[in-house]
Amino acid sequence: MERSVIVTGGSRGIGRTICLGAAKVGYQVCVNYAHNAEAAGEVISLIQAAGGTAIAVQADMTKEADILRMFETVDRELAPLSALVNNAGIVDKASRVEDMSLERLERMFTTNITGPFLCAREAVKRLSTAHAGKGGVIVNISSVAAKLGSPNEYVDYAASKAAIDTMTMGLAKEVANEGIRVNAVRPGVIYTDIHASGGEPNRVDRVKSMVPMQRGGEAQEIADAVLWLLSDQSSYVTGSLIDVSGGR
């Protein structure tokens, strides 16, 4: 059966690895990106070279019109939607709450909360048996920061991911009898370039001593958990928050 998946923020880091893995197990892949068309193109090339099908779709997660256009493009160009991975997210420079600007907070919460909500809304419209869909899976990428709070660094980011955890649990119960499973993966400190965008490219090495396993994680270790949740092997799993964090 032909099926497709949308991976938001799919051009780099964890999202890139998820895209490649999803293609390998037979999904047609929508690689969403905000700005880096070249990186998205590289993911498409790798998938196509391996015999898979993929398209790159630019869409800013803070813009509803972009999100609607992304889903409509998938409707037109790929197999019927079967899964959504809400992976796109941002972090900002380390800061205490007392120093956070309104602009920072609005950007953080719109990207990390509103965007995933809008994507989930559009996915449910297509997947739900109540809308004549055939069911499917939504996987949200949260963070172990949601339970740690990230004091003195990213309380806003941690709060945005806690909102994703709550959305995961609530939406899972809302659509459980409509053929849709909704789960979240909560990464710990992972070797990706999100830390550079937050102004500290070596953050993983700085904090890995706080991890019980004494190391940072790899993007593949997160992708493996996501791919399991997308598969029938997790057919009785919904509303779950899976920590992939080395014990944090």
Image: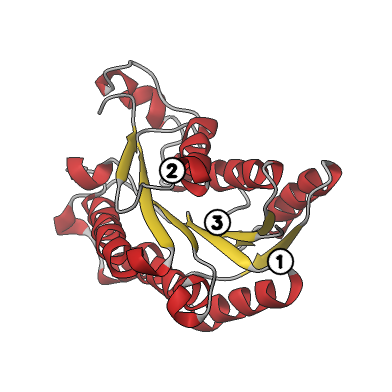
Q: Nearer the viewer, mark 3 or mark 2?
A: 2
- Looking at the rendered structure, the kind of residue marked 1 is Ala
Q: Position of residue 168 (x, y in %)?
A: 31, 58
In the rendered image, which residue does mark 1 sit on? Answer: 79
Q: Is residue 138 left or right of residue 60?
A: left
Of residues 169 and 209, the one drawn nearer to the viewer in this rendering = 169
Q: Reply above or below: 171 against 234.
A: below
In the rendered image, which residue does mark 2 sit on? Answer: 234
Of residues 113 and 205, the one drawn nearer to the viewer in this rendering = 113
Locate the C terminus and report the quarter of the image it occupies: top left
- Looking at the rendered structure, the kind of residue marked 2 is Ser
**Secondary structure state at the residue bearing disc 3:** loop
Q: Of the residues under marks 3 and 2, which one precedes in the sequence?
A: 3
**Secondary structure state at the residue bearing disc 1:** loop
- Looking at the rendered structure, the kind of residue marked 3 is Gly
In the rendered image, which residue does mark 3 sit on? Answer: 9
Residue 193 visible at all: no
